[in-house]
Image (cartoon, grey):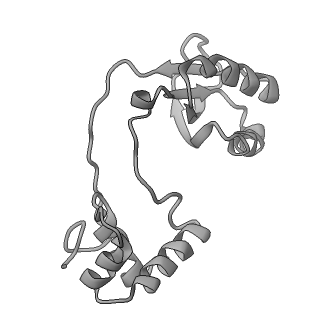
Amino acid sequence: MLSPDDARLIGFLHGGFPLSDRPFAEVAAQLGCSEDAVIERLQHLLSHGDLTRFGPLFQIERAGGRFILAAMAVPEERFDAVAAQLDAMNEVAHNYRRESAHPDQPGATPLNMWFVLAVESADQIGSVVQRIEAVTALPVYAFPKEREFFVELKLPLFDGGAHGTR
């Protein structure tokens, strides 16, 4: 459970981070605490799984890389094991459970494990998909991006808006 201070910190950082020589010091000054306290709280939130990542988002295609949304129909009894296999792969940015219709087999296990592949170059996607299929013995359905949309989703962590009072 997030403390009110943790929720305030996350809400404050969501959607904005100072670009300066000492960004954590700037955040600390605005929140009324020390730079070390901000860094320590973020490390705690990450190490305890309250945050899964803290960092910038890049348009990987501009650097020659690719992000691909992919999915698999994983039998329920294997779901946790397959998730662990994906988690161990550097190219898997994250995976999650989501129920969706199977693309071509009525009555089959629905596509229930979704994940994002992140590779340094577009020509690596095929070999990563093949490796996942070999390791899991399950087909991977890859959905390359056709068009990009910018959706700035900010969910408030407490009453008073996404950033609370500053």
Give the left or right position of residue 70, taking residue 38 as reference: right
The location of residue 115, given as percent across then percent down, is 57, 36
Count every numbered label the image shows and give the total: 0
The location of residue 147, given as percent across then percent down, is 32, 21
Give the left or right position of residue 121, taking residue 152 as reference: right
- Where on the picture, by quarter, is residue 110? top right
As drawn, 147 above or below 33:
above
Closer-to-camera residue (141/75):
141
**Residue sitting farthest toward the front:** 21
As drawn, 41 above or below 15:
below
Closer-to-camera residue (46/59):
59
The location of residue 99, given as percent across then percent down, is 53, 34
**Residue sitting farthest toward the top:** 104
Q: Residue at x 74, y 38 (%)?
A: 82
Instruction: State the quadrant of the C terminus.
Output: bottom left
Q: Residue at x 28, y 57 (%)?
A: 15
- Where on the picture, by quarter, is residue 104? top right
Closer-to-camera residue (52/38):
38
As drawn, 44 above or below 89:
below
**Residue sitting farthest toward the bottom:** 33
Give the left or right position of residue 1, taking residue 131 as reference: left
Q: Residue at x 55, y 67 (%)?
A: 46
The location of residue 51, given as percent across then percent down, is 50, 64
- Where on the picture, by quarter, is residue 26? bottom left
Q: Residue at x 40, y 83 (%)?
A: 35
